Amino acid sequence: MATANQIFEEMMRAGEKAFGEGWHAVANYAPTEFRKMAIQITEIAQNVAKYKLDKSEGYSPETGKILMKMQRTAAESVLVATTQLNLIAVQKAMDAVYKVLRKAFKGIVKSIL
Amino acid sequence: MIRALLLAGAVVLGGCPGTSLVSPYDEAIDKGIVEFYEQLNWFVKDVADVAGKPEGTYEANSKRYNVMETKLDVLILRSSSRSLGTGCRLEAKVYEKVAGLLASNLPADMKPQGDAAGDANGCNTRLLELVKQQLGFIREIHAKTDKCGTPPVSCLRPATAASALKIANQSINAVAVVEAAKRN
């Protein structure tokens, strides 16, 4: 079974390739969430294994399957949020540039009219 | 001619609020998702504490799920009223890239939602819908797969509750993080 660290490293590589330049904008959020996912996936496997040894411990494989579906949903949430965080950074940069342009442009217009 | 062009440009820049890539900050969604976080976390821990007892069964708690689901429906309705109903465009773009990288390892559930004509507000709606999906999964576990005691009754086992909360909170956190980024 892959370790949490191996899963995490793989996710980080995939994320970096998928987001390219924009990766740095989400560098704080995405790695934290990917690490949580890697730990949670191994926890699910451990809890199902515990249940198989002792029915009063952990949880059943059926519950484990639903929890894995939940983890895929959480992965989608993180990917969508990451995209949005990228865009918010771009939007803020655009707004700043726009503000400067508008100020400069108005000055020029005033001086020639 | 140049003066006319500059004047036209100034009018455009002065009157246009700028191109919007993301939906605007929404205080109701920001506060609503924090309230939902508190509600869900309190509920799941509470139910896990009484696992195996009559008050911990799904039947005894089904109405509490309805209350939480309704709260999310209100937030989804608010968010979707601003969108064009064409889905989350950027999500589809990201999925194209991720699908290319993961190839056959891409989980079946991870498919692009919406289409190329989607809009920024659609992404907000999608994030909230994913939170609703998480609530539905917890409900399914409580009603169908988790059993406690003798004779076995429906329950949320403490181990399940711990795992489910950590995962669901990731989806809730995704909404909160995006709204916080817009606010700051």
Image (cartoon, coloured by chain):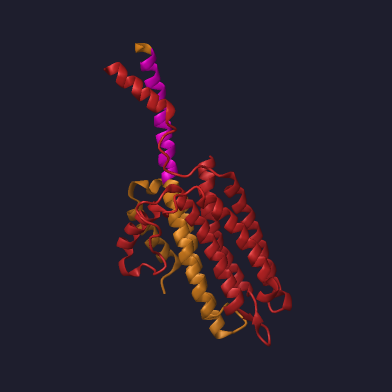
Chain colours: A orange, B red
Residue B93 placed where, x, y %? 35, 54
Quick check: B138 left or right of B91?
right
Question: Is the N terminus of chain B in the top left, top right, bottom left or bottom right quadrant?
Answer: top left
Quick check: A96 left or right of B157?
left
- Relative depth, front residue between A97 and B160: A97
Q: Is residue A111 above or below residue B172?
A: above
Q: Which picture quadrant has residue B58?
A: bottom right
Q: Which picture quadrant has residue B137?
A: bottom right
Number of callouts in the render?
A: 0
Residue A36 placed where, x, y %? 50, 61
- Relative depth, front residue between A93 and A16: A93
Residue B68 placed where, x, y %? 63, 62
- At 50% from the left edge and 48% from the top edge, which residue is drawn? B178
Magenta includes A107? yes
Does the magenta stretch mainly form a helix, a strand or a loop? helix
Q: Is residue A82 above or below residue B107?
A: above
Q: Residue furthest left?
A: B1
Quick check: B65 left or right of A84?
right
User: Is any part of residue A75 visible from this angle?
Assistant: yes
- At 54% from the left edge and 60% from the top edge, which residue is drawn? B131
- At 41% from the left edge and 45% from the top edge, which residue is drawn? A87
Q: Is residue A108 above or below residue B45?
A: above
User: Is any part of residue A101 visible from this angle?
Assistant: no
Residue B177 placed where, x, y %? 52, 49
Q: The magenta stretch spans which residues? A: A87-110
Magenta includes B4? no
Quick check: B122 left or right of B50?
left
- At 53% from the left edge and 47% from the top edge, which residue is drawn? B179
Q: Is residue A97 above or below residue A88?
A: above
